[in-house]
Image (cartoon, rainbow, N blue to C red):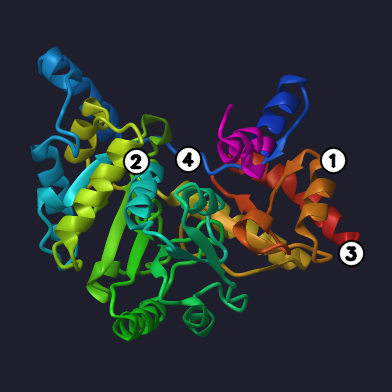
């Protein structure tokens, strides 16, 4: 009497959530837990975020603050977001290009569903966010993984080109990347754009990039995060304020279909229809006002950067192999012995919680989130050191 695919999704927890909840149980039992499992921001929202919440609630009529907006969002808020993007990039976005959603996940599922024609294939580049697969497959498209470039976790464009077929509708690009923390370079993205432009001509239909950008503002050492629509016009942006404004529980983001995208009006309308079919009415109206007012705010990354450098330097000094991350707040580390699940289980026995990389498309790597307290990170280092010694 129930949909078996949905039942399987509901009964199978993500490995990230399972580890996180295990850690909560251990901590409740009085255990010391070193939890690197979940990417929950650990720095406060910029001061102006809370101030804006308070100001709106104090100074604007309650019915206006809490009432419905248009399904894509209030036009003045959408316009403010578009103008902030225009101020940073060589773009000509309008409020009409923006559709507010309850975070990046509904933005992604709406765009994927809009492109899920019969026989559709959606590519994702390993390592990839684990939820991409259910997002694609739940919409009856084929999920096609592209093997990882293990030298630098850039994009293996030759491997990607081999997997592009006449059925390819889109490629999901996530940079800065979860789980690797790597930022795709402009050179890498230009090579990707050349492949997709050539293949679009060959198959006589557009191949879109779905750019998943929740970590866009989290970059270190002056690293550039290229604006993909400037490199490949057929790019749809999916964004969340969860990381940039440290407000993941507020669930606010958007998809953006620039005018330069081929059939932009049709794609925007189809994605809006997809959102409607999934139960979207409008994103929370209070959050729309807050993020519009704070769209130019940036997080203080010092704590994340200190953790990134400390953990990377420590692990590589012990003998772990890891590409140095330049964005987000993760390290993706090659598991000693080559079996990340076995290594993760060994670490779990010491209450060191690391996410094995199978769901990210790399069975021999584990992910460590660095949005943790610095004190906990330092306390965990002897465990990391003792674990690798078992393999040396």
Question: How far separated are the C-alphas under marks 4 and 1?
Answer: 25 Å
For image coordinates 71% across by 20% down, the residue present is 28
Decide which of tag 4 and tag 1 comes sooner along the chain. Answer: 4
> In the structure shown, which secondary structural element does the residue marked by tag 3 occupy?
loop
For image coordinates 12% across by 58% down, the residue present is 93
Decide which of tag 1 and tag 2 comes sooner along the chain. Answer: 2
Question: How far separated are the C-alphas under marks 3 and 4?
Answer: 33 Å
Decide which of tag 2 and tag 4 comes sooner along the chain. Answer: 4
Q: Report the side of 25 relative to 312 (left or right).
A: right
Whether tag 1 and tag 2 are in contact, CB under 8 A, the answer is no
The residue indicated by pointer 4 is: 41
Q: Is residue 299 visible?
A: no
Question: How far separated are the C-alphas under marks 3 and 1?
Answer: 17 Å
Q: Report the side of 285 relative to 32 (left or right).
A: left
> Does 289 appear in magenta?
no
The residue indicated by pointer 3 is: 391
Question: How far separated are the C-alphas under marks 2 and 4?
Answer: 9 Å
The residue indicated by pointer 1 is: 349
Decide which of tag 3 and tag 2 comes sooner along the chain. Answer: 2
The residue indicated by pointer 2 is: 245
Q: Which residues are magenta?
A: 1-18
Q: Is residue 375 visible?
A: yes
Decide which of tag 3 and tag 4 comes sooner along the chain. Answer: 4
Position of 310 relative to 319 (above/below):
above
Residue 62 position, x and y percent, is 15, 13
Q: How many labels sit on residues?
A: 4
> In the structure shown, which secondary structural element does the residue marked by tag 1 occupy?
loop
């Amino acid at each position: 009497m129930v949909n078996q695919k949905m039942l399987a999704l509901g009964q199978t927890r993500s490995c990230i959530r399972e580890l996180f909840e295990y850690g909560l149980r251990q901590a409740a039992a009085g255990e010391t837990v070193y939890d690197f499992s979940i990417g929950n921001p650990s720095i406060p929202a910029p001061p102006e975020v809370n101030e804006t919440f308070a100001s709106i609630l104090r100074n604007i009529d309650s019915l206006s603050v809490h009432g419905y907006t248009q399904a894509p969002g209030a036009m003045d808020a959408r316009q403010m977001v578009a103008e902030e993007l225009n101020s940073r990039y060589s773009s000509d976005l309008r409020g009409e290009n923006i559709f507010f959603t309850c975070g990046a996940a509904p933005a992604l599922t709406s765009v994927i569903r809009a492109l899920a024609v019969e026989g559709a294939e959606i590519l994702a580049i390993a390592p990839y966010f684990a939820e991409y697969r259910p997002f694609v497959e739940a919409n009856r498209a084929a999920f096609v993984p592209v093997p990882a470039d293990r030298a630098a976790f850039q994009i293996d464009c030759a491997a990607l080109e081999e997997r592009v077929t006449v059925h390819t509708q889109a490629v999901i690009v996530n940079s800065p990347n979860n789980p690797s923390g790597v930022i795709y370079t402009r050179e890498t993205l230009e090579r990707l754009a050349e492949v997709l432009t050539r293949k679009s001509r060959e198959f006589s239909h557009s191949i879109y990039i779905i750019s998943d950008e929740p970590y866009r503002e989290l970059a270190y050492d002056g690293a550039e995060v290229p604006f993909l629509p400037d490199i490949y016009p057929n790019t749809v942006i999916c964004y969340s304020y969860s990381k940039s404004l440290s407000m993941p529980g507020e669930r606010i983001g958007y998809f953006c279909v620039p005018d330069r995208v081929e059939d932009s009006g049709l794609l925007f309308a189809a994605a809006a229809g997809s959102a409607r079919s999934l139960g979207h009415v409008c994103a929370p109206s209070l959050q729309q006002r807050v993020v519009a007012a704070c769209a130019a705010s940036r997080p203080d990354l010092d704590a994340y950067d200190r953790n990134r450098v400390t953990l990377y330097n420590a692990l590589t000094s012990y003998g772990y192999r890891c590409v140095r991350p330049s964005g987000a707040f993760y390290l993706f580390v090659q598991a000693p012995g080559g079996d990340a699940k076995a290594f993760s289980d060994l670490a779990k026995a010491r209450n060191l919680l690391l996410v094995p990389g199978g769901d990210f498309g790399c069975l021999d790597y584990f992910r460590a989130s660095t949005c943790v307290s610095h004190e906990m990170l330092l306390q965990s280092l002897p465990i990391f050191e003792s674990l690798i010694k078992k393999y040396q």
